[in-house]
Image (tube, rainbow, N blue to C red):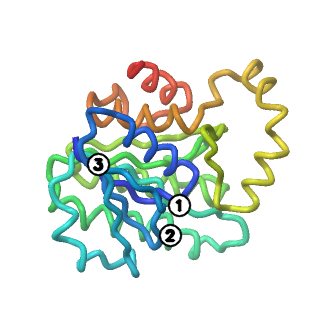
Amino acid sequence: MKVLIFGATGMVGQGVLRECLLDPGVARVVTVGRAETGQKHPKLRELAARDLFDLSPLSSQLAGFDACFFTLGTTAAGKSEAEYSRITFDLTMSIARELLPLNPAMTFVYVSGSGTDASERGRVMWARVKGRTENALLALGFNGAYMFRPGLIVPMHGITSRTRLYRVLYAIMSPLVPLIRAVFPDSVTTTERVGRAMLAVARNGYPKPRLEPVDINQAALSTD
């Protein structure tokens, strides 16, 4: 399997990249982003894009992939709906529309979030925008499209978030994770499980297009 990853320097992206590099069934991994991960591996190639809204200079290198794992995103904190939409909706759809004709058999896996509003009419701004993005991706025409909606993601294997606010929150919440797992076992997953679940879904599909934390964990277990 040949895999394309957007957002490989983020916390979720790091986890997905790790699992792809470890998986013997993945023959090639290409990351696309403004910055490289700095990792070295025989099956890894990194493409730097100055402007992610214009991937035309890279188009010849973005064809022939079986799956795209889209983990690129931004926090809604401090942003207007227009600002948040530009990254969350406009950029995601711009990239997806670029990839589809180049990879008609591709499975597109998008990292959304628990609580996303598929009705697009709720009061929570980020949830509406994420819901609009999910709906547009599902209607675009990929061979397969799956929306991952993780809740609490526990970073593993030394992975950390690049966002300072998230690093602080994870440091504060870390002692509480065992309790949260005990009380809400279906709301917690890990970077490792998210990566394994993406690979499983890309290979075998999933009974529904939107995967909540319990579904992500279930899909990950199918690879063990």
Q: What residue would you read off at disc 2?
A: 87
* Position above or below: 113 against 32: above
Q: Are marks 2 and 1 in contact (CB under 8 Å)?
A: yes
Q: Which residue is identified by label 3?
A: 3
> Does the CB distance between marks 2 and 3 fall below 8 Å?
no
Amino acid type, residue under disc 1 in the picture? Gly
Spatial distance from mark 3 to mark 1, Cα to Cα? 19 Å
Q: Residue at x 64, y 62 (%)?
A: 75
Judging depth in this view, the residue of 115 and 28 nearest the camera is 28
Counting residues from the start of the chain, the first of labels 2 and 3 encountered is 3
- The tag on residue 73 is 1
Q: CA distance from mark 2 to mark 1?
A: 7 Å
Relative to 115, 173 lies left or right: right
Q: Quadrant of residue 209?
A: top left
Which residue occupies the foreground of this view, 96 or 66? 66
Q: Residues within 10 Å of mark 3 (few under 14, many from 20)?
A: many
- N-term-proximal mark, 2 vs 1: 1
Location of residue 58 in the rendering, given as x and y in whole percent from the top left corner: 24, 73
Name the residue located 40 percent from the left edge and 81 percent from the top edge: 50
